[in-house]
Amino acid sequence: MNVMLLGAPGAGKGTQAAKIIEAYGLPHISTGDILRKAVADQTPLGIEAKRYMDAGELVPDSVVIGLVKERLSQPDTDVGFILDGFPRTVVQADALGEVLVELGKELTAVVSIDVDKQSLIARLTARRTCGACGAIFNVIVRPELLDGVCPTCGGALNQRDDDTVETVTNRLNVYERSTAPLIDYYAEKGVLRHVDGNQDVGDVWTAVDSILKG
Ligand code: AP5
Ligand code: MG
């Protein structure tokens, strides 16, 4: 099963990817996570990517296309994969199409998680991520986690550097300009499915899973 999660920043792509991993054990290909690891490791890629990410801008297409191409050619993706945060532009979507043809793979479903803009801003500024296990939380839904301790593993909960109000505003503008056109792009290919992401996490998952079950 080859799944793509589309949606604005804060729509719940990472949250739903975790549910898909739990249910189906597919490898998670999140370009944001790959880039954040490179930033943390201070690799040349991370040093280049950081200035774009901190500003809420997209990292150049050539850089992320190269990363995904390499990742998709690894053997663990033979059972399927979850693409999260890629593609983000029509150029990336076209490149992905070519890579999939080369690898003899096809997308099973492109799931668009649709959420109102006001909720996106609230969610992103309320997000906490565990530095140890990667679990994602919303401290509006779970205010007890403002103590900064991960309830899953006891690790420290962090705020992402790009979750400030200023950077979030730009990320949402960049999404509208560069990424939202992919909704029509995949609708025209006949693989797009919509999910109402304004519901609670469990109800969004029920909708996503029913699409995956076909
Ligand atoms: P990336 O990491 O991909 O960030 P993003 O797309 O902005 O999306 P987020 O991770 O912020 O949101 P999400 O949809 O995963 O939501 P989550 O589940 O965490 O990219 C970061 C940066 O990297 C980019 O700005 C760019 O610079 C660069 N980059 C990455 N990919 C790139 C590419 N392909 N090309 C170029 N540059 C690239 O949930 C958010 C919050 O909401 C959490 O608090 C969560 O608990 C909560 N939540 C989730 N679902 C619900 C719900 N149903 N109800 C209530 N709260 C919920
Ligand atoms: Mg994410």
Image (cartoon, rainbow, N blue to C red):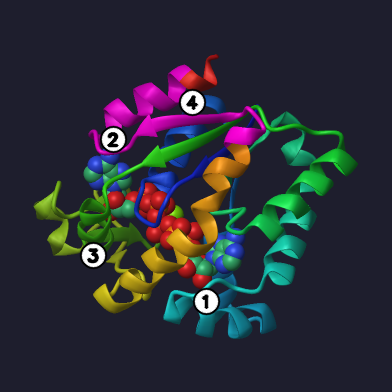
In the rendered image, residue 57, in percent from the top left (x then y), is placed at: 49, 75
Element under label 1?
helix
The front one of 174 and 56 is: 174
Q: In the image, which is nearer the foreground, mark 2 or mark 4?
A: 2
Magenta residues (range): 187-210
Query: Gap in Å between the C-alphas at discs 4 and 3?
Result: 28 Å
Return the residue at label 1.
40
In this view of the protein, can residue 116 be seen by the observer?
yes
Dots 2 and 4: beta carbons under 8 Å? Answer: no
The reply to whether the magenta stretch includes residue 172 is no
Pick whichever of labels 2 and 4 is earlier in the sequence.
Answer: 4
The front one of 138 and 153 is: 138
Pick the quarter of the image with the C terminus.
Answer: top right
Query: Gap in Å between the C-alphas at discs 1 and 2?
Result: 29 Å
Query: Gap in Å between the C-alphas at discs 4 and 1?
Result: 29 Å
Return the residue at label 4.
23
User: Outermost residue toward the right?
Assistant: 102
Return the residue at label 3.
125
The reply to whether the magenta stretch includes residue 197 is yes
Query: Gap in Å between the C-alphas at discs 3 and 2?
Result: 17 Å
Residue 161 versus residue 97 in the image, above or below: below
Pick whichever of labels 1 and 2 is earlier in the sequence.
Answer: 1
The amino acid type found where label 3 is placed reads Thr
Name the residue rendered at 85%, 39% in the picture.
Answer: 101
The amino acid type found where label 1 is placed reads Ala
Please indicate whether residue 107 sits to the left or right of residue 123 in the image.
Answer: right
